[in-house]
Image: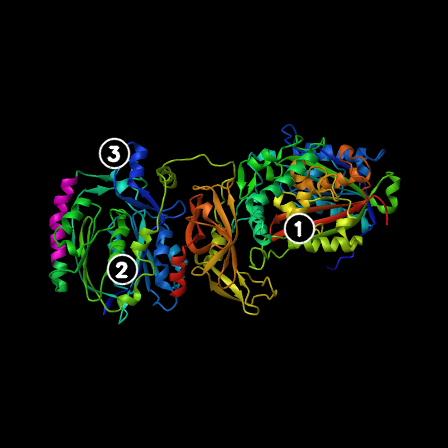
Amino acid sequence: MASNGIRDRVAVVGMGCTAFGEHWDKSASDLLIDAASECFAAVPGLTQNEVDAYWLGTLGSGSSGLTLSRALKIDYRPVTRVENFCATGSEAFRNACYAVASGAYDRVMAIGVEKLKDSGFSGLTSARPPDDGTAYSGTAPAAFSLLAPAYCRRYGIDENAMKEIITRIAWKNHQNGALNPRAQFRTPVSKETIAGSPRVAGMLGIYDCSGVSDGAAAALIVRAEDARDYTDHPMYVKALAFVAGPAAGPLSPEYDYTTFEEVVRCAADAYAQAGIREPRREISMAEVHDCFTPTELVLMEDLGFSERGQAWRDVLDGFFDLDGGLPVNPDGGLKSFGHPIGASGLRMLFEMWLQLRGEAGERQVPEATLGLTHNLGGSPGDCVSFVGIVGGELG
Amino acid sequence: MHGILRYGAYLPAARLSRAEIASSLGAPPLQGSRTVAAYDEDTTSLAVEAARSLVVDGAPRPATLHFATTAPAYADKTNATAIHAALGLDAHCFAVDSVGAVRSGVGALCGAAQTAGLAVLSDIRTGLPGSADEQSGGDGAAAFLFGDGEDVIAEFCSMASATAEFLDRWRVPGELHSRVWEERFGAQMYAPLVRDAVGRALEAAGVTQPDRIVVSSPHARAARATLAMFPAASHPEGLEETAGYSGAAHAGLGLADTLDRAHAGQTILLVVASDGCDALVLRTTAALDARRAPRSVRAQLAAGRPISYSSYLTWRGLLRREAPRRPDPAMPAPPASARREPWKFGLVGSRCRRCSTAHLPPARVCVRCQAVDEMNPERFAESRARVATFAIDHLAWSMAPPVVAAVVDFDGGGRLLCELADVDPAQVRIGTRVAMTFRRLYTADGVHNYFWKARPVEDEEDGEQRHS
């Protein structure tokens, strides 16, 4: 992987994040204004007109940079609209960071938004370009549910045990989300309720799926050497990795639906950039793309947090719980915080921002020094992946 | 020698018992069952399934394609072209529909017989809920390849026709049901027409007593009266009781069923009494044994699976059900469909000349070795596969939820993510054996989206394929 990285060259000095959920009273513009306003307010004295350029991530809540500049009445600045499936928010952040690292700009904002609840549909929908109608176009839960029987088969786990494993992932993320005032779902959910919820696809019940929600999140990015001019506790970017795969999974019988090769490659790049050799020990906490519970299970192995075939044991042992060895999705994750596509990657960074500054309240992970965010888009075997690593200190 | 070279038949898997219809409607119990085209089948897809085995490697290429049905998927547009594409026939092959009337089936047989062509007779029969047509109808298709030479399995000996205009049965285009006149009128109109045509056909063939007789008529009483003209031994149990009367396809299914069981050197009299009468005499040859259809009509009948009356009504559009809150599927774009005709209709993927990696859909760049434009086309429609993993999708829209999606790996390499057809979700496992089947995925903006699905196959059928 030929990636030089920009370790410790840029820093986040302000962030904003709306509550995620059913904002019947807010448009995408309203959500953008709320997230941007909170972000500007995080840096006393900074005004919108001192931000040099913007990267807007949205899957489908608007087209072009005008979606943001119209809403904020931006004073004739560059605004780049970014789309990369469910990793859209992370991708906006990544490109904004590079713009600062290149020296092109001093201050930039990455902001993501999605307004999903206005469609009236259940779950995510996507519009495809006109085509021949032959591509299988199932639902997202069906695509990710392909992981469960494959994982069971490969590691000799029976269906009941698998249900217990994925139920525990949902339970853990709901426990965490219940501690988060900005989460979509703030009521702890019992394992019995999760396991007994109506089936959506394969082994997945409603409670195995992430929340369909509205929301926005934003980050203000500056040169690392300037960061302390804005805040006493900046968040330094250690690694930014992104991979788009060749879509080999749906073509190749070698692919067995128990891993995301894109994530494996992407994580290797990120760890190399950040100088991390033992992620399970060195990473303090992670926000990962738990779009569906089996996804989080597989990601624990792909990100190197668990040995191959062992993530299910770590899940059952509570290793990824808030008080475990490596807390995963301390803010509730996509599962309970909700998943407004374009905002999710930045929402993950927002939790890192709070955690690294010691502002995560009841969810505070002790001695948090390095955080990992992981964002995935597409479907197993045919996806894009982002891995970012951030820290509270230089070096 | 001129006649039939090969034949094939297809009965859809779904069976609706007449007892199920009767109990749903609170009517007195009825005997038997009918075949039902699934929600993802139409007369075009049934035709493809019936004709597939006739155009395998080594078979003579038909010069023409004659398609007959009373229930065409499209008007104005030729339906035979989709069949032509799915079978991968030559571009120079003439393809034409004979649609609307039951007698169209005979038209297709004659057209193909005269041109070394392929006749495909296909039908889906409907009627008003509770009607005799509904319970006595059936869906299915049969195909016959005609030609000359020593490979002829049934020689075409003679044909005679009689035509008359009278109102026995009729249907206004667009209506789901036919109207019929009082039964005895039709019976008396048909009787002399049948005697006339049959007499002349037998005389022309020099046959006094055919060994086997197949009678097909939308007028059940006229059909019974025709059969009664011959000894019972020449007409064993017909398909009406278990499969139903399948309109334009019925004569073909009856002939296929007879060819399944006939011996060499037997004469077959085929009588179609519809708006007149057509009588054909055929004589089987010693080549028959080696060229029987891969799956007999009776084997297919035995393999059906029962469906509820509510499923039947839903599939035929007679019962509109609440859909999930999901967007409507998009219409396939005509240019994109035309660009990928071999893939969409023929399941023609590609295989890399450098590293032999198979690609479905066909690709220009190899996923393994990245070679560009080094591909050979390869048809996967006849290949068997196994389920690598699967998902039962309760959220996706379907007329028969839940949708079962599966990743299937072909025996000779290659993988496809597709829907499963004719499937009991509880029976799907990793490793389940599947065969590909041509289906209509959905219809959007008046466009039928034809493509392939995988259907689970029993060990027995799987074995037949592997040994053939």
**Do callouts 1 and 3 point to residues on the same chain?**
no
Q: Chain of mark 1?
A: A
The question of residue B414 being in magenta is answered with: no
Q: Secondary structure at mark 3?
A: loop
Question: Given the image, on which type of amino acid does mark 2 rest?
Answer: Asp
In the picture of the structure, the residue carrying the numbered disc 1 is: A310
Q: Secondary structure at mark 1?
A: loop
Circle 2/circle 3 CB separation < 8 Å: no
Asked if residue A5 can be seen in this view, the reply is no
Position of residue B399 measured from the top left corner of the image (x, y, whole percent): 43, 41
- Classify 10 Å Cα crowding around label 1: few (below 14), some (14-19), many (20 and above): some
Q: Secondary structure at mark 2?
A: helix
- Classify 10 Å Cα crowding around label 2: few (below 14), some (14-19), many (20 and above): many
In the picture of the structure, the residue carrying the numbered disc 3 is: B28
Give whichever of discs 2 and 3 has the lower sequence position.
Answer: 3
Q: Answer with left or right where residue B239 lies relative to residue A51.
A: left
Position of residue B379 measured from the top left corner of the image (x, y, whole percent): 46, 62
- Magenta residues? B183-199
Q: Chain of mark 3?
A: B
At x 74%, y 48%, the residue is A388
Asked if residue A367 can be seen in this view, the reply is yes
Q: Answer with left or right where residue B68 lies relative to residue B275.
A: right
* Residue A329 image-quadrant placement: top right
In the picture of the structure, the residue carrying the numbered disc 2 is: B260
The Cα atoms of the two marked residues, 1 and 2, are separated by: 56 Å
The Cα atoms of the two marked residues, 1 and 3, are separated by: 61 Å
Position of residue B218 measured from the top left corner of the image (x, y, whole percent): 22, 46
